[in-house]
């Protein structure tokens, strides 16, 4: 059994799985002239609050722990600070390597385990940027989102969980990660050959999780608005 969490994670037994933190995103954007004040601190505070509330024994980061494909000094400092705050709250931290996670082997010196995939109570946890063999998967990578209309009729994009019988797609944990509208484009190869209309859609809010039913039914409803 598993429990979807409104804080954009999933709890399985004594483990919590989150994906797509993209630590260092703030610095990468600053180099392009876009400034996101306190982005790292906001995300770190959210993770610490989640761990203190749920009290898991293990934190699993399902890929894209970091953002930049090239080494950045501040990114490394933020990674060290991240683990300094997180590791006292759990017994174990595991990073499942994602496509952005180049050059992270040094975090093993901090006591962090780095793996390519992980088996957890019948589920295979992989980042989702490349296909692997297995039967039931939990992936990240997609940053799944959909566009909904708010009370004044404006379109807003919201992160979502996509839940199928043998595949669960996690929303990006980072609030700054670009959400991919799955009705317009699919990124992960795991989703390119499955019938998404039968997947359940859940929208995570700060304290609650909203069920929007099956994606196919939701699309029909949105077309009538």
Image (cartoon, helix red, strand yellow):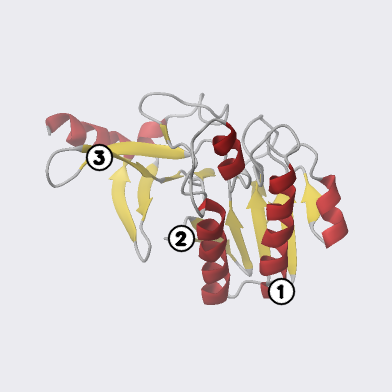
Residue at disc 3, secondary structure: strand
Disc 1 designates what residue?
88
Disc 2 designates what residue?
7
Mark seen at residue 161: none
Between tags 3 and 1, which lies in front? Answer: 1
| Near-viewer residue (120 or 73) | 73
Query: Label 2 crowding class (10 Å Cα cut-off): few <14, some 14-19, many 20+?
Result: some
Q: Residue furthest front?
A: 33
Disc 3 designates what residue?
148
Picture residue at 36% right of the left edge, 66% below the top = 207
Tell me, yes or no, if residue 139 can be seen here: no
Quadrant for the C terminus in the image = top left
168 sits to left or right of 196? right
56 sits to left or right of 107? left
Do the residues bearing badges 1 and 2 touch, measured as CB atoms within 8 Å?
no
| Whole-percent x, y for residue 204 in the image | 38, 55
Picture residue at 48% right of the left edge, 29% below the top = 194
């Amino acid at each position: 059994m598993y429990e979807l969490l409104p804080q954009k994670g999933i709890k399985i037994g004594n483990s919590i799985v989150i994906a797509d933190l993209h630590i260092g995103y703030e610095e990468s954007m600053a180099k392009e002239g876009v400034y996101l004040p306190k982005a790292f601190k906001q995300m770190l505070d959210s993770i610490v609050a989640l761990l203190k509330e749920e009290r898991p024994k293990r934190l699993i980061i399902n890929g894209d722990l970091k953002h930049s494909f090239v080494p950045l000094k501040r990114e490394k400092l933020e990674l060290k600070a991240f683990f300094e705050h997180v590791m006292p709250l759990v017994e174990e931290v595991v990073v499942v390597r994602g496509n952005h996670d180049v050059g992270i082997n040094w975090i093993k010196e901090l006591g962090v385990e780095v793996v390519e995939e992980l088996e957890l109570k019948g589920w295979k946890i992989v980042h989702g940027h490349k296909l692997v063999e297995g039967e039931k998967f939990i992936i990240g990578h997609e940053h799944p989102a959909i566009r909904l209309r708010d009370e004044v009729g404006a379109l807003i994009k919201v992160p979502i969980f996509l839940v199928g019988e043998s595949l669960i797609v996690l929303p990006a944990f980072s609030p700054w990660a670009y959400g991919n509208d799955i009705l317009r484009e699919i990124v992960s190869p795991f989703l390119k050959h499955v019938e998404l209309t039968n997947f359940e859609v859940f929208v995570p809010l700060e304290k609650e999780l909203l069920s929007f039913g099956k994606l196919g039914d939701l699309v029909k409803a949105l077309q009538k608005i």
